[in-house]
Image (cartoon, rainbow, N blue to C red):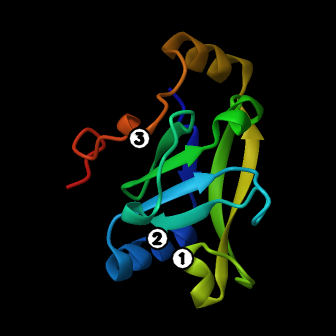
Amino acid sequence: MPPRVIVTPEAAEVIRRLKEQHGALIFHQSGGCCEGTAPMCFRQRDFHVGPHDVLLGVIEGCPFYVGGAEYKYWEYFQLTIAITTGGGDSFSLEAADGVRFLTRSRMFTDEEAKELDAAGPPPRGSEAFRPAEAGVP
């Protein structure tokens, strides 16, 4: 089954550095007013996952959620999390370093979409991410 979310090598390096500095992290992409559709990176202890948030995948050992309302938009897209310079004003952890995460997307092929449909929808809510099952110590 194709992964719903992947990460570029450059973004993976930033994630690893942020984990060393801050501990366990979580990503959330909501499409809300702050940062639009940019993925936000928080300490896991500082972010409350809502019951409708959808776990799209795990990047560098960090759960990546999308808001429940946004999932219908992203359902048939693979998200690639990348990094760019210019952090700007943001609540996301990487902004302090003058960089920011961004999302690129590609539509799944018909074959990939059928495979994802057969697997059923991704899990929702805070109980969806189980570190041990994701290979996270």
Cβ atoms at labels 3 and 1 below 8 Å apart: no
- From the viewer's perspective, is 36 left or right of 63? right
Which quadrant of the view contains residue 77? top right
Pinpoint residue 92: horizontal percent, then vertical percent: 59, 72
Marked residue nearer the N-terminal end (3 or 2): 2
Residue at image position (57%, 20%) is: 116
Read off the residue under disc 2.
Answer: 15
Q: Secondary structure at mark 1?
A: helix
CA distance separating discs 3 and 2: 21 Å
Which quadrant of the view contains residue 28? bottom right
- From the viewer's perspective, is 95 left or right of 18? right
Residue type at numbered disc 3: Ser
Marked residue nearer the N-terminal end (3 or 1): 1
Q: Quadrant of the image for the C terminus?
A: bottom left
Q: Categorize mark 3 by other alpha carbons within 10 Å: few (<14), some (14-19), many (20+).
A: some
Residue type at numbered disc 1: Leu
Residue type at numbered disc 2: Ile
Q: Nearer the viewer, mark 3 or mark 1?
A: 3
Q: Categorize mark 2 by other alpha carbons within 10 Å: few (<14), some (14-19), many (20+).
A: many
